[in-house]
Amino acid sequence: MSPAAPESPATSPPAATAVRRSLWFRVVVVLVVLVLGVLTWWWRSPELFGGQGSTLTIRDETGTVALAGVLVVPQQVGDGTVTVHSAQPRIVKAADGTEVDVLACHDGSFGTARGRDSLDEYCMSHGEVAGARLDEGDSLVVAVRSDEPQRVVVDGVDVTYSYGWQRGTQTTGLTAVVTFAG
């Protein structure tokens, strides 16, 4: 009987096992990174509010405040609470000196749309949006004031908020077109 040929180091069982372990380790690392990436994206990309909606046209007189409800907290929040960290109006057109604020309307029926009314008529309470805790049915309202005749366009709001484990910024709300006449 002739002696068997010696195994080469590249095909020896210990070397093949080490290569397989190294490959499996790399696959596990890639999968962990992918899962963490998806979880991070989910955590930073909430979509609680709908996208941007229709257009509300308001005609008002200079020196008055026009109100537009730009979004309502949806029913899906259930027993949860939405904490608003900031809400910046997306001002497309406005002259210098125009005041545009975003306010929180609690326990009310302001909803979206309106015109020139007082928030006191629709909200049990209202105030600053930064730090506001919103529940189902609460609203964010854009208040626009101008002392000059002009047309102001606010294309929704950029809302930074947290809901449960999620925190992020979402552009939402309707477009308010307010014409102030002299």
Image (cartoon, helix red, strand yellow):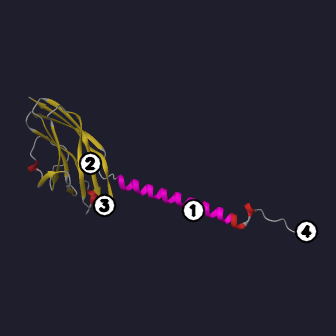
The amino acid sitting under disc 3 is Gly
- The answer to whether the residues at label 1 and label 3 have Cβ atoms under 8 Å apart is no
- Mark 4 crowdedness (10 Å alpha carbons): few <14, some 14-19, many ≥20: few
The residue that label 2 is drawn on is 159
Is 109 part of what is drawn in magenta? no
**Bounds of the magenta segment:** 16-45
The residue that label 3 is drawn on is 164
**Gap in Å between the C-alphas at discs 3 and 4?**
73 Å
Q: Earlier in the sequence, mark 2 or mark 3?
A: 2
- Mark 1 crowdedness (10 Å alpha carbons): few <14, some 14-19, many ≥20: few
105 sits to left or right of 164: left
The amino acid sitting under disc 4 is Ser
Residue mark closest to the camera, 1 vs 3 = 1
Q: Earlier in the sequence, mark 1 or mark 3?
A: 1
Query: Which sits in the foreground, 15 or 47?
Result: 15
- The answer to whether the residues at label 1 and label 4 have Cβ atoms under 8 Å apart is no
Is 21 part of what is drawn in magenta? yes
Image location (x, y in percent) of residue 53: 28, 42
The residue at 44%/58% (across/down) is 36
The numbered dot on residue 25 is 1
Quadrant (top left/top right/bottom left/bottom right) for the C terminus: top left
The amino acid sitting under disc 2 is Val
18 sits to left or right of 11: left
The amino acid sitting under disc 1 is Phe
**Gap in Å between the C-alphas at discs 1 and 2?**
41 Å
Image location (x, y in percent) of residue 56: 21, 38
Image location (x, y in percent) of residue 164: 30, 60
Query: Which sits in the foreground, 149 or 26?
Result: 26
- Mark 2 crowdedness (10 Å alpha carbons): few <14, some 14-19, many ≥20: many
21 sits to left or right of 142: right
The numbered dot on residue 2 is 4
- The answer to whether the residues at label 2 and label 4 have Cβ atoms under 8 Å apart is no
